Image (cartoon, rainbow, N blue to C red):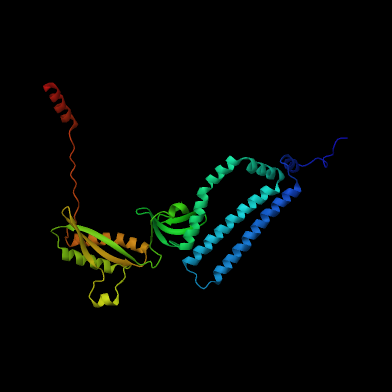
Amino acid sequence: MPATPLEEPSAFISFLRVIGMDLLILLKIIAVIGAAWLVERIIYLILRRGYAKRKAKGRDEFTQYRFLRNAVRTVVVVCAFFAVVYTIPSLRSFAFTLFAGAGLLVAILGFAAQKAFSDIISGIFIVSFKPFRVGDVIQVGQQGLFGTVEDINLRHTTILTFENRRVVIPNSIIGEERIVNSSIKEEATCQYVEIPVAVDADIAKARKIMQQECKAHPAQFDKRTTEEKAAGEPEVPVRLVDIRDGMVTLRAYVWAPDPVNARLMRYDLYERILQHFVKEQIPVAVPMRHFVQQNPYRTNLVEHAQTIAD
């Protein structure tokens, strides 16, 4: 007797049978995913409430909060994945067979995960010893990346550059680099403003112009102590730091409240000081380079004549 349309299995049920699953297993998978999401939300709310109750809410506490939040999310996702694999009988038997009988594959996977474990350990060290925190302005490497730390998780650190580009660096790599932290104690930055002038220029007049322009900049502030003010130390010292190639380098030491304003202030001061120098006829030195190029045609003639003589 042919089956009626109501007795025919649906396409979804047929698909589940093909992959060796039934509705009960599907419900278990949904329950596992739902439980993982619920656990992640509960832990997230606990961490958030704990962070809100802390009296000190500086960058140290915020870095620890972000790192723990990312770590909990990663652990929950990994646990949910293994729970789903264990729930499906076909995948569970395949996984047991794979890891029980394929020792070489396990060794390969362990070697591949070595880098991941190194990043995790480095991330824990970064959060524990605090060479930098979320929100700090740092420079990675001696002449490398310069920007603000945006996030630190188990695997990598995200840095937001001043070009609004996010650079992701593994924790094991950034942990081995030389870090220049502009925010670890205070953000006040002493910015160098160097101007090369000619040797025969009026050095005293050039120094006075540089001090005047630096003191007039809105980002500059007086960092002198009471003792330095009593001793008559200038608010903006300008010193002659180098003499070479027919020019004299004058360096002004200007203080700004943070490294970002310090860099912008330096750009502004270059333009202002240059315009003032031109107005007061202070000659700015420009290094000269002499290039000597040998004429290849003349060289070939000399070599040809030498061959004939021989």
Q: Position of residue 50 (x, y in %)?
A: 57, 69
Q: Between residue 107 and residue 183, name the one nearer to us.
A: 107
Q: Between residue 215 and residue 248, name the one nearer to us.
A: 248
Residue at the image position 68 percent from the left and 54 percent from the top: 32
Residue at the image position 43 percent from the left and 59 percent from the top: 148
Q: Position of residue 223 (x, y in %)?
A: 31, 71
Residue at the image position 60 percent from the left and 65 percent from the top: 45
Give the left or right position of residue 43, taking residue 57 as reference.
Answer: right
Give the left or right position of residue 157, taking residue 232 as reference.
Answer: right
Relative height, residue 308 to residue 70 (above, below): above
Relative height, residue 88 to residue 45 (above, below): above
Which quadrant does the C terminus fall into?
A: top left
Q: Residue furthest right?
A: 1
Residue 170 visible in image: no
Which quadrant does the N terminus fall into?
A: top right
Residue at the image position 63 percent from the left and 63 percent from the top: 42
Quarter-of-image position of residue 308: top left
Give the left or right position of residue 183, taking residue 244 as reference.
Answer: right
Residue 258 visible in image: yes
Q: Position of residue 146 (x, y in %)?
A: 39, 56
